[in-house]
Amino acid sequence: MSDRNLRLKPNLLCIVPPYPLTSVPLGPAALLGYLKANGCHDFDFLDLRLWVPYSFAPTHQQVGAFGETFVLDVPELPLVLQMLRNFEEGKPLIGPPTELFERYCAERVINSVYLHNYLTMLDRFFERVFSQVQDLRFIGFSCWTTNFLATMLAAAHLKRRKSPPFIVVGGPQVTESIHCGQLGLASGLFDAVAQSEGEETLLCLYEEFCQGNGEVTKPVPGTMQRDPETNGFRITERKPLRMKELPLPSFDEMSILSYGRPYDDPKYNNLRILPFQLSRGCTDKCSFCSEWVFWRTYRVGPTDRAVEQLKELKSKYNADGIWFSDSLLNGKMSRLVEFAETAKKQKLDVLWGGYMRADMTPDTASLIFEAGCRNVFLGIESMSDETLEVMRKRRAEAHNINALRSFLQTGMVVQAGLIAGFPGDTRHRFLHTARVLQEIQQEFVNLNVNTEPFAVMPGQPIFQELGKYDLHPRGWAQDYLDIAPKYRFITNDVYCSVDGPNQGIDRLGEFRIGLSLGDAVAGLNYGRKEPLGPLRFQLDYVYQDVALGTIKSTAAMTYGAILTKAEQAEFDQGHMLSTFQGQSSIPMLEHPVFTDMLGRLEAAHVVPPRRTHPGIYANSYEGSLSENAGLTLSPFVIARVLEAGGVLLVVNFISSKCTVLPASIAWLVEFLAGTPRYLDEIRARAKDLDVQDDGWMKTLDDLRERGLVVVNDHRTDSPAAPFRRRISLQVIQSTS
């Protein structure tokens, strides 16, 4: 498959792994929507998480070998410092494992061989990805705790270019951890750090970038930047946006059908679910939470406007489900009731869910259920009044129980969130919490319990008053900091862990008790491993005895192929042979035993798998076919004709969704592979092949609606107009 003519715009928003793929990301969609509303159509979106097997946090753990409480400031600081040192010395970014690397892994109960392989493969993945994006001038990364190291690694690849792009990094991690932002800026990997919400900040940065011929020399509100005069760090404040100033998020640039689903109930898994916000911020000020600090103020917008925007999402993207990512959907109960009543009255007709606190009556629960609410994450945290008071939850055990019953009696699926190891909790109190929840679970099968270990994060109020909770911070060992001593002016102030009450074995024990109440994995998937390895196909049967085989390549990519029953048996025999030869640990895609097998397998496909390089190009969604849209296959599509059944299987090997078509349509799928085609070109191709049945147009539209065919380009008679802001700049606060 050739990728000629497949291009990304030189300005990108990007997310790198690892981080969950539970739903389409709202943050970049909100940024893109705001940019477009202000006349800027210069950006594409690239979610590199889609290309690699899912793994939540392979580079660090919150709970140590003996229950230690690690601080999520720069949680993998030794790995970050080693990468920065390699970058500065011109060495491979991921070098051989060192004694300090091994020690770091042992302290965090991480398999050092696995982690080194993971980072080596990820490093190779970034190299191959960015080699396909030759013209890159401005890139914005979204950063969480789990992907900070990977974001730094990706930025290091880009900054080694002869003409490196301008790099801005935003998101929760660099907002609450000032040290993460400082390390990025001091190393030269970041040119600016966007703090808190980023819509207007990104727009202003890009505006200055365009006016400054690729440089941003002025202070931009909402950012941390390097001060050229003092060489220190300059933080400039910006007022939060009002909800009515936020346009509809844009999901046009996203492969929306390749993402997972936020609902736990299988009957909702085939829904097209998009994220949305009715509010920003939180009315509660819990001591352990940093999210309300990120948003700074609690804001809601007009209900009628929100419902109209949701109608537009439904119409534009055929959305039949909404996951509200509000910090607190019932932060203002009258607003939630008004939304539910308006949604019913205007027949919004979408299923939805979101995060709520334990504040609910049976009547209100029935109302929101009738309005479409089917899934709720409820921040219970504890069933101890004493613990809840220390948490500043403004709730009591009775509130928690009443709210749970109100939701559960409607039939909604409820996830009750618990925190294990909170410093104001005790073994006795946590066991009481577990018993109460078990009793409710015996009555309601629709109650799940998700447990997170208590974590110390720099954005929490508790972080500013550790002594009040009898928590004692510990810095990193000196030899870790000496990996890159030039950054000691930053790293000397970074905490590694805390000691104190209910930590250590108590926290670890409570965490295990919490896990026994619900899923085998914690609420935010701490410790979840990648589903794929590099040694053997994982098989997922997609059509009769034909399977989708997926495996992780040595460049971190997910490789997918369609295998018949005979081919499955042949690969099984190959594995037995490799084991007999003592070569079972060699990655399968590079194993000599499988070379011929893989060659024959790939040759049997109409659209073959990619073994070495990912398909990096724009793959956007549009709600209908257009004469001016250049169409191509999604980079996650493979296809194969089964001669025995006379059918064509078209498979998204990321989502494992399979579409079965007549073999006679294979010409269309093959024609769309690798090069954008316009409708007039497809018609001409059909005429050249003497295709008599014009049903291919309906098939093409169906493939587009399933996300298997995507928009890569647009034909226009005039060049794109230069960016000019449509909306005047918001009044900003004084800088500091």
Image (cartoon, helix red, strand yellow):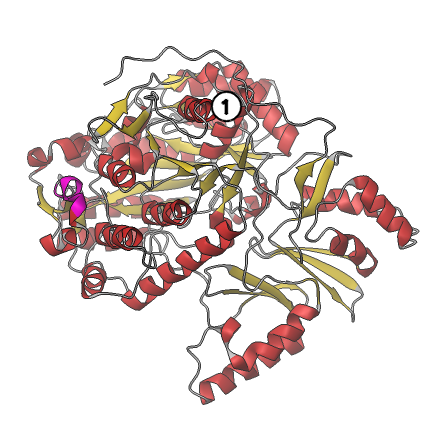
Nearest the viewer among 288 and 179 is 179
SS for tag 1? helix
- The residue that appears at 7% across and 33% down in the rendered structure is 468
Answer whether residue 489 is magenta in the image.
Answer: yes
> Which residue is depicted at the point 21% across and 53% down?
78
**Residue at image mark 1:** 34
Nearer the observer, 692 or 198? 198
Residue drawn at 20 percent across, 51 percent down: 510
Residue at 45% x, 19% y: name it: 337
Residue stretch rendered in magenta on the structure: 486-492
On the image, the x and y values in percent for residue 624 come to 72, 34
**Residue 725, placed above or below residue 53:** above
Q: In the displayed image of the protein, which residue is found farthest to the bottom?
A: 580
Percent of width and height locating residue 278: 45, 23
Residue type for callout 1: Tyr
Residue 499 visible, this angle: no
In the rendered structure, the answer to whether residue 454 lies left or right of residue 23 reads left
Question: How would you rate the neighbour count of disc 1 (Cα within 10 Å): few for under 14, some for 14-19, many for 20 or more?
Answer: many
Could you tell me which quadrant the N terminus lies in?
A: bottom right
Image location of residue 659, percent across then percent down: 70, 54
> In this view of the protein, can residue 22 be seen by the observer?
yes
In depth, the one of 200 and 622 nearer the eye is 200
> Relative to residue 374, is residue 598 depicted above or below?
below
696 in magenta: no
Q: Relative to 328, is 250 on the left or the right? A: right
User: Where is residue 144 shown, x and y percent of the image?
Assistant: 34, 41
For the C terminus, give its image quadrant: top left
Left or right: where 286 falls relative to 582: left
